[in-house]
Amino acid sequence: MYKLEEIQQNFKIIRTGDNVLDVGAAPGSWTLYTHRMLLKGNGTIIAVDLNPLNLNPVPPTVTAYVGDAFSKEIREKLVEHGPYDAIISDAAPMTTGNRSVDTSRSEWLAEQVVYLASEHLKPHGNLVLKIYQGGGQETVLKQMRSLFAKARAFKPKACRSDSFEVYLIGLDRNP
């Protein structure tokens, strides 16, 4: 939550009333923060993860799906709820402990989220996603720069100093 709070303070990713897609939403801290602090009950959140949200009750602004956000079945549901004003993703791959494998999986995940943004993000919409440093972040940023007016890497202070995660921010999707 603190990471998203810092990202929001710096980049204004989400506005009250937005339709937000949260990819890799479980356990639900980003979803809950978005509901309570950013949308303030005015807007919608579509939360997708391989695991169920750990929120009881699930806020009324949230529609949650358990499944792979990149599967045909879930993508059809995402289309029904879209397009989106913002896409947020704190998703991380299942880690192996092998940094090379883990960063490669992180890059794949980030590329898939960028692809979702290219399909489902409204013009002028925003994107934030997590990627592991060394996981092809420059390649993903290059893809994002063709999609957004501004794209950059950002490491929130809330990240542990020994963490190799960084967030990629895409602002103002090109029409």
Image (spheres, rainbow, N blue to C red):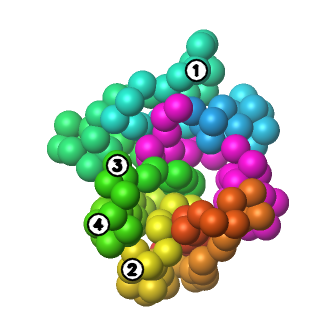
In the image, the segment drawn in magenta is 1-27
User: What crowding class fits label 4: few (fewer than 14 Cα within 10 Å), some (14-19), or many (20 or more)?
Assistant: some
Q: CA gap, disc 3 to disc 1? A: 22 Å
Q: CA gap, disc 3 to disc 2? A: 17 Å
Residue drawn at (56%, 44%) of the image: 19
Front residue of 143 and 16: 143
* Disc 1 secondary structure class: loop
Q: Are marks 3 and 2 in contact (CB under 8 Å)?
A: no
* Disc 3 secondary structure class: loop
Type of amino acid at the residue the image marks with label 4: Val
The residue beneath circle 1 is 55
Question: Along the polypeptide, which appears first: circle 3 or circle 4?
Answer: 3
Type of amino acid at the residue the image marks with label 1: Leu
The residue beneath circle 4 is 101
Question: Along the polypeptide, which appears first: circle 1 or circle 2?
Answer: 1
Residue 124, position as x, y percentages in the image: 58, 68
Type of amino acid at the residue the image marks with label 3: Met
Residue 130, position as x, y percentages in the image: 51, 61
- Quadrant of the frame with the N terminus: top right
* Disc 4 secondary structure class: helix
Q: Is residue 115 visible?
A: no
Q: Residue furthest front?
A: 97
Nearer the camera: disc 1 or disc 2: 2
Q: Are marks 3 and 1 in contact (CB under 8 Å)?
A: no
Q: Are marks 3 and 4 in contact (CB under 8 Å)?
A: no
Residue drawn at (66%, 73%) of the image: 154
Front residue of 47 and 137: 137
